[in-house]
C-alpha cells in the first residue's frame, strides 16, 4: 500500500501567513514561522489523517460533525462590493468617474489575494499591493504600419509604476471595500482595524515615483501667470476714457 502523502507547511507570500493545502482547499495557520502556526499545522494534519483512517464512505465516520461553512474569499467579497458600487457611484443615471480607478484597484486586489479568506488580509497584504503598484507597467495601444502597409496595433509600455499619490488613493479604495464588508456584517471589525493601520507611502521615502510639479506658463512679460505679475508691457495699458483726456 503506498504511503499517504502529507501536505506540507508552506508560506503564502501575499499575506505572510502559513498555509497547508489539501484537496484544493487552503487552511491558513497564522503568521509563518511562529510556534502557534506549527501547532495549527499539526492539528490540521492530525484531522486529515483521522479522516483518512476512519471507517465509512469517503473515509469519514458516519456520525462526523458537519464541516464549518467555507470562509468568505476576497474574490467573493470583490464581486459583492462591485455590485454595490455600480449602483452607488451613479449621478444623473450615469456612472461617475470613480468606477474606472475602482475597477483597476479591485483587479489588482483579486490578482494578489483573490483566493485568500478575507479574515487573512492584513497590513502585510496591503504592503504587497503597494509594491505591486510600484512595479506595475503603464501601457498604451499604438498603431503600427508594416512595410506592406498593413496596420496592426501593439501594446507599448509608457512607464513603470504608478505615482505615490495614485498608489495611496488606490489603497484607500481597497480599504473602503473592507469597511463596507464590516457594515454588511461580512467581516469582523478587528480585521478592518488592522488593515486601516497599514501606512500610506511617504514622499521621497518609497520607491514610488513622484509626479512632476506643473509650473505656471510664463506670460509675454516673462513673468508667470499668477497674481502680482507686475505692470503690463508698454503699449498694452488700458485706454483713457474721453473725460480722462487732457
Image (cartoon, rainbow, N blue to C red):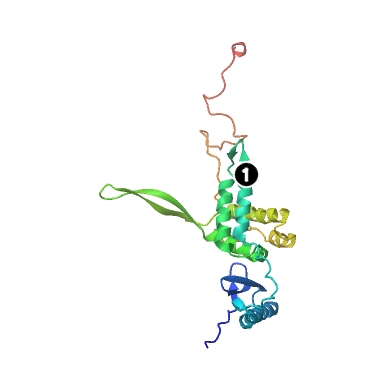
Residue 42 lies in quadrant: bottom right
**Is residue 138 positioned above or below 34 on the image?**
above
Q: Residue at x 56, y 51 (%)?
A: 103
**Secondary-structure class at tag 1:** helix
Q: Position of residue 215 (x, y in %)?
A: 55, 43
Query: Which quarter of the rendering shows the C terminus?
Result: top right
From this viewpoint, which residue is outermost toward the right? 189
Q: Position of residue 241 (x, y in %)?
A: 59, 14
Residue 7 lies in quadrant: bottom right
Q: Nearer the viewer, residue 41 or 132?
A: 41
Q: Residue at x 55, y 40 (%)?
A: 216
Query: Is the residue marked by circle 1 packed among few (<14), some (14-19), or many (20+) residues within 10 Å?
Result: few
From this viewpoint, which residue is outermost toward the bottom? 1
Q: Which residue is mark 1?
A: 87
**Is residue 196 positioned above or below 26 on the image?**
above
Q: Position of residue 111 (x, y in %)?
A: 54, 61
From this viewpoint, which residue is outermost toward the left? 148
Q: Residue at x 53, y 25 (%)?
A: 236
**Is residue 81 positioned above or below 68 on the image?**
above
Q: Nearer the viewer, residue 40 or 238?
A: 40
**Residue 203 at least partly seen:** no
Q: Position of residue 66 (x, y in %)?
A: 69, 70
Q: Nearer the viewer, residue 1 or 132?
A: 1
- Number of residue marks: 1
- On screen, residue 90 versus residue 150, left or right, reads right
**Is residue 50 positioned above or below 124 on the image?**
below
Q: Nearer the viewer, residue 230 or 106?
A: 106
**Residue 105 at least partly seen:** yes
Amino acid at each position: 500500500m503506498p504511503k499517504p502523502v502529507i501536505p506540507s507547511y508552506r508560506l503564502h507570500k501575499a499575506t505572510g501567513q502559513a498555509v497547508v493545502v489539501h484537496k484544493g482547499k487552503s487552511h491558513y495557520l497564522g503568521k509563518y514561522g511562529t510556534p502557534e502556526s506549527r501547532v495549527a499545522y499539526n492539528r490540521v494534519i492530525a484531522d486529515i489523517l483521522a479522516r483518512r483512517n476512519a471507517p465509512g464512505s469517503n473515509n469519514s465516520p458516519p456520525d462526523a460533525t458537519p464541516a464549518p461553512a467555507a470562509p468568505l474569499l476576497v474574490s467573493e467579497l470583490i464581486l459583492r462590493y462591485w455590485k454595490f458600487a455600480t449602483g452607488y457611484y451613479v449621478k444623473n443615471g450615469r456612472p461617475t468617474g470613480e468606477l474606472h480607478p475602482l475597477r483597476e484597484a479591485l483587479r489588482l486586489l483579486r490578482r494578489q489575494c483573490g483566493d485568500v479568506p478575507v479574515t487573512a488580509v492584513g497590513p502585510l497584504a496591503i504592503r504587497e499591493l503597494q509594491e505591486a503598484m510600484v512595479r506595475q507597467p503603464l501601457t498604451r495601444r499604438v498603431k503600427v504600419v508594416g512595410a506592406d502597409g498593413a496596420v496592426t496595433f501593439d501594446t507599448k509600455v509608457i512607464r513603470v509604476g504608478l505615482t505615490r499619490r495614485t498608489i495611496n488613493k488606490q489603497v484607500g479604495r481597497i480599504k473602503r471595500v473592507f469597511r463596507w464588508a464590516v457594515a454588511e456584517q461580512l467581516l469582523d471589525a478587528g480585521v478592518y482595524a488592522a488593515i486601516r493601520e497599514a501606512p500610506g507611502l511617504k514622499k521621497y521615502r518609497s520607491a514610488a515615483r513622484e509626479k512632476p510639479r506643473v509650473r505656471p506658463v510664463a506670460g509675454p512679460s516673462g513673468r508667470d501667470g499668477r497674481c502680482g505679475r507686475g505692470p503690463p508691457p508698454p503699449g498694452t495699458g488700458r485706454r483713457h476714457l474721453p473725460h480722462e483726456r487732457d
